[in-house]
Image (cartoon, helix red, strand yellow):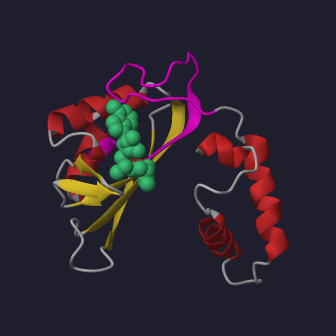
Amino acid sequence: MVNRWLAGDTGDFDWRPFIRHCLSLEARGTRPVGDNDLKFREAAIRRVVTRVTTCDIYASPPVTTTRQFDVVMSHYCLDAVTNNKDEWLANILNLQQLIAPGGLFLFSSLLDADHSDFGNTRYPNVRLFPDDVKQALLDTGFDPASITVSTVPADHEAREYRGVIFGAARLAG
Ligand SMILES: C[S@@+](CC[C@H](N)C(=O)[O-])C[C@H]1O[C@@H](n2cnc3c(N)ncnc32)[C@H](O)[C@@H]1O
């Protein structure tokens, strides 16, 4: 699906509202975001994404590579493969092998959820609160001064989660 989008086939999923939203956040209200801005950014993404590969977060390292990266992101995946907090912590350590010393880790997780529904698939979810996330980052060697954890409430009460947790931390250099 991602490869098809990179090749110019947009039939699977329309990313444009999300890209437009990112552009308007970047503009911080200083100017309107037009169709040309959107097209320019879509082309830039297609230019810089050089490889799409598979990941198994239970593997060490989770992606077949000998490289480490300055920025590693994981959104609603680390928390969405297990109910078990020890496994979650071990998987953070697996992922950490991909981050270069001093590199940035950016992630999102569900807040206070034991499962998530994604399309027709139900995923287990480790039940997390901001303090669990902060402690895990401290325990796994991220620079304490770099750790930021914030939450946003769920958009309505019927959700299987109470909100989302956003985190950022730098690996100690
Ligand atoms: C809740 S979905 C989140 C998807 C997407 N990141 C998003 O934010 O919309 C959880 C994702 O974890 C992936 N996943 C399941 N088992 C995994 C594993 N062992 N290693 C890495 N990812 C896995 C699933 O394929 C699924 O895409």
Measured from the top left, where is residue 171 in percent x and y? 45, 36
Q: How many marks?
A: 0
Residue at the farthest top position: 66
Picture layout, residue 30 above or below residue 109: below
Residue at x 36% of width, y 30% of height? 57
Q: Quadrant of residue 158?
A: bottom left
The residue stretch that appears in magenta? 52-79
Residue at x 81% of width, y 69% of height? 37
Measured from the top left, where is residue 108 in percent x and y? 39, 54
Tell whether position 67 is magenta. Answer: yes
The overriding secondary structure of the stretch rendered in magenta is: loop
Tell whether position 73 is magenta. Answer: yes
* Residue 141 visible, this angle: no
On screen, residue 46 versus residue 61, left or right, reads: right
Picture layout, residue 173 above or below residue 145: above
Q: Work out which quarter of the rendered image holds the N terminus and state it.
A: top right
Measured from the top left, where is residue 51 in percent x and y? 66, 32
Residue at x 56% of width, y 25% of height? 68
Picture layout, residue 5 above or below residue 3: below
* Residue 89 visible, this angle: yes
